[in-house]
Amino acid sequence: MELLSMLKKKKVLTNKDINIRDPFVISENGVYYMYGTRARFFGKKTGGFDVYTSEDLENWSAPHECFNSKKYDLNHMVNWAPEVHKYKGKYYMFATFTRESNNLRGTFVLKSDSPMGPFEPHSNGAVTPEEWECLDGTLYVNPDGKPYIVFCHEHTQIIDGTICYAPLSDDLKEIAGEAVTMFKASEPYWADRQKGNEHRITDGPFMYRTKNDTLLMIWSTYIKDKYAECLVRFGDGDLSMNFEHLPPLIDDDGGHGMIFSSGDKLYLTYHSPNTSGFEHPCFVEIEDTGDEIIIK
């Protein structure tokens, strides 16, 4: 109740006032907690991450710093895409930083007792492959309780970006097996294959299990030069190479999204436009049909 009372006094921002990329929302006890990349300088050397709180997904508190990357020598270059997952009673933030050791990006895991933070380093460095340039790692826990990281191998290193996954240790401190590459950005049936710029981007994977136990993944790329939110459906109810690409959810300059529920409603949040300095969190209600998700 104390937090709700505080929120009623401190609702000072609307979605249009907030300039972040990669919004990520969790909902607990009537409060929404939103994290994201500080969009200034495209998320480079921004000093950490903030959390915003709301009761209605429209009016938000002022940003509260929940992780200070300078304090832990993680402000070397990028501070990207924080997402918070509740796992075994604690809050774990998966976020992308640039390693000082080799100047390659990777996803690190941070930990806190509260969604408000402060978060502190938890993993033994990055939990993506050491010699890969990676970003946007997300947590997936399979039906047997085994944790995995699903992430992007960057186009900056391999030209045609990919979506990959790898097992994690149960304590989320390190990668615990070989990474599996699922697909390249150029492989979906709807992908742009025009010649010119061969770099193809993969961004922001996020896993969602439907009411009929179908496993889906959303992810982002560019379609006809516009940022897009895309959809994959797995055939075995778990991470595997048995999957299919479904039609994109958004193809008009919005992406890097995630899915969350509140009461009996289901939402997709993403940032749009994908133009530095103008990005804002967007929220649309979606429907879980059992076999896929659709925008209402």
Image (cartoon, helix red, strand yellow):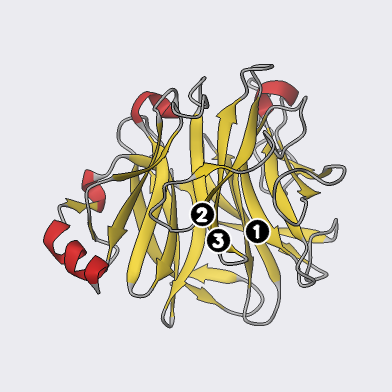
Side of 30 relative to 100 (left or right):
left
Q: Quadrant of the C terminus?
A: bottom left
Amino acid type at circle 1 is Met
Q: Quadrant of the N terminus?
A: bottom left
Residue matched to label 3: 90
Badge 1: residue crowd in 10 Å (few <14, some 14–19, many ≥20): many
Q: What's the residue at 67%, 64% (across, down)?
A: 216
Side of 279 relative to 210 (left or right):
left
Residue 127 seen anywhere in this rendered image of the structure: yes
- Pick whichever, 155 or 198, lies toward us: 155
Chain-order first, disc 1 or disc 3: 3
Residue matched to label 2: 84
- Pick whichever, 295 or 24, lies toward us: 24
Rounded to the nearest angstrom, the CA distance separating label 1 from label 3 is 24 Å
Q: Which residue lies furthest to the left in this view?
A: 9
Rounded to the nearest angstrom, the CA distance separating label 3 from label 2 is 10 Å
Residue matched to label 1: 217
Please tell me whether residue 49 is drawn above or below residue 88 in the rendered image: above
Please tell me whether residue 6 is drawn above or below residue 161 in the rendered image: below
Q: Are marks 1 and 2 in contact (CB under 8 Å)?
A: no
Q: Where is residue 116 in the image (x, y as percent from the top left)?
A: 38, 54
